[in-house]
Image (tube, rainbow, N blue to C red):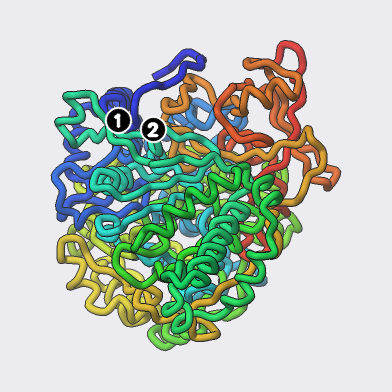
Amino acid sequence: MAENRRIRPYKQPAGGWGALKALGEHLVEQGIAIKGSKTLLRMNQPTGFDCPGCAWPDPKHTSSFEFCENGGKAVAWESTAERCTPAFFAEHTVSELEGWGDYELEMAGRLTHPMAYDAASDRYLPVSWDEAFATIGRHLAALPDPNMAEFYTSGRTSNEAAFLYQLFVREFGTNNFPDCSNMCHEATSVGLPLSIGVGKGTVLLEDFDKTDCIFIFGQNPGTNSPRMMTSLRNASRRGATIMSFNPFRERALERFQAPQDPVEMVTLSATPISARLYQVRVGGDVALIKGLMKVLVEADDCARGAGQAAVLDWDFIREHTVGIDALIADLKAADWASLERQSGLVRSEIEEAARAYMKAGRAIVVYGMGITQHRHGAQAVQQLANLCLLRGNLGREGAGICPVRGHSNVQGDRTVGITEIPAADFLARLGKRFGFTPPSAPGHNVVTALQAMARGEVRVFFGMGGNIVAAMPDWQVTRDAFRRLDLSVHVSTKLNRSHLVRGREALILPCLGRTELDVQATGPQSITVEDSMSMVHASLGLNKPASDDLKSEPAIVAGIARATLGTRSVVPWEELVADYDLIRDVIEDVIPIFQDYNARIRVPGGFHLVSTARERIWNTSSGKANFLIYEGIQEDPVQKDNDVLWLTSVRSHDQYNTTLYSMSDRYRGVYGQRDVVFLSATEIERLGFEPGDRVDIVAVNGDGIERRVRAYQLVAYSFPEGSCAAYYPETNPLVALDAHDPLSFTPSYKGIPVRLVRAAAGAA
């Protein structure tokens, strides 16, 4: 549905009638008003399919109406009546399609046939599955070194597909597994194990019903994980204190109208969510967290000096942690003037928030990519762990740390082996189960994979889902690297940018979606996924596939494995793909935490993969939870030029990852456009502009390379001093490939130093 370009403030609460109206319009736009409505009623149900959107858990898959606006859009996007057939590709050259916008590309509909790029006509032409598999097998088998291929994974890939994928790639001989978590929550996977011994959160959904306080850092749940709003709303209504820390005053963090609540819908009322919303400066989160901890330490000194109860949980600290003395010394050395300047908050605001945390008997710390996607994201995550440890808010009900993951199985993919740095015991069990020796050398993550591609060391790229070309930073480097490949392959449901920025040979392999019936030799198959809180449950697609020529992801992996490895493979690929129960049996053999896998997924709601940190078992080198120091308070490099702003990339409300459901952002009042940059009216005036002016955004990276996006409209918005925001992935060209966290290699999408320069006359 086309919309006029305009800026119009949105005054309604998040959710409510606005959400129902938007979802209804989207179902109509995709031509599935009736089919889509029926499909939605089967989502997140005991015998239905899991939402293909976010990874927020469901209440044991027992609700009769458990989906959100953006989850509904994800289903509509997949279930669309539109088809991207060979006839479509016959009408459009790849050069022409490169000029289309990302929204237009995906609006072409579901891919229906395997397609191969033909250089002579500059078009994708249909091929058979056998031809596609043979092409991939020929290229992979011809490589002098298996490490000259990269195998990317999207978070929507099921446990079964991901396990078979890593099994094939390791039998092939490499650990090159760049995956989408490298670009979002790798800082969690790397940072938390050093602190508490696990790279996942420690809370369950029911903890939100028992907590006294919820602190939310760098997370916009109303857009990125809207089903979380039910938990926040319920917590608010029963009196839990919610404090939010975010540069934007996101509407869902202010108030929410539950579409499932007939009283709120009829009375047009809403539930306040955050008791306070603190607008933290971009790059100011570590200073804020240190400030909070500094208040706790100072209050503890005062209380104990006066003979009162301690503020810190010293019993827990002495029994379960190490490093407290060094942390306290570091916090006492931090001066308030620097903390205020870097965080963008005044001392009294930080003290107010800290008092709420001190008052809470049990507290949950929630965070998103506003924390992880910085140059020191892993260390920022560790500071949040410190905050939890100071009050003993780990390993007990109603308390814990809660990273909010993105895609619906990004966490599960990692659990079943998608990692470039596999554990030795995992490799040993995998090799013993199948009778081969898996490679042990670390492979490539997303950043090091692209660096290797740019150096010409990689010849084949295989993408299991996703849209990596759009998701990557430093677009010119990314696109040049992909065009140097001998072969690029993408397993996809819809057309996207990555299919157009291709190698000399290229394949598009269409796969089944989460909503669709997957029938193999033994009948209909269920797959499984793991949510943000380590709950594993089954998902059974029910819709007729968009095309008779679609294959499931496990079947695609098996086909490529047979074509590449031939008779030297020790894996019974056809047997495993015929019955996914057998895949789960093998996962159980290799990964002991999946004991009784098949039996437990047949219980509504599935089962929980136990977190050792939740049990106060610390799998760290010290055998205890570690207080870890962040030197100084600068989350990002210091810029002395007053004209330099810190830009954070954000997603619109009509967006999921790189997928655009429309060109609008309802909650921020932006319609029909995405080429906008948000900053305060004060900053606009200080820089000599007026709202509505067009500017180029120029990165300040210090490497002599100009990175610029052009003709963005200035939108005056409540935003911290020295900060601005614009949409992802359009601002990814501003992020240098070297601008990443040295521990996790997560690109710094949320902390980009930029200047705003007046655009050329007439630019728009």
Q: Nearer the viewer, residue 270 or 259?
A: 270
Mark 1 surroundings within 10 Å by alpha-carbon count, few (fewer than 14), some (14 through 19), many (20 or more)? some
Contact? badges 1 and 2 (CB < 8 Å): yes
> In terms of secondary structure, where does tag 2 sit?
loop
Horizontal placement of 46 versus 672: left or right? Answer: left
Q: Quadrant of the N terminus?
A: top left
Mark 1: amino acid = Ala
Mark 2: amino acid = Gly
Q: Which residue is mark 2?
A: 109
Q: Residue at x 34, y 40 (%)?
A: 273
Which of pointers 1 and 2 lies earlier in the amino acid sequence?
1
Q: Quadrant of residue 709?
A: top right
Q: Quadrant of the C terminus?
A: top right
> In terms of secondary structure, where does tag 1 sit?
loop
Q: Residue at x 35, y 35 (%)?
A: 77
How far apart are labels 1 and 2 at the CA level? 7 Å
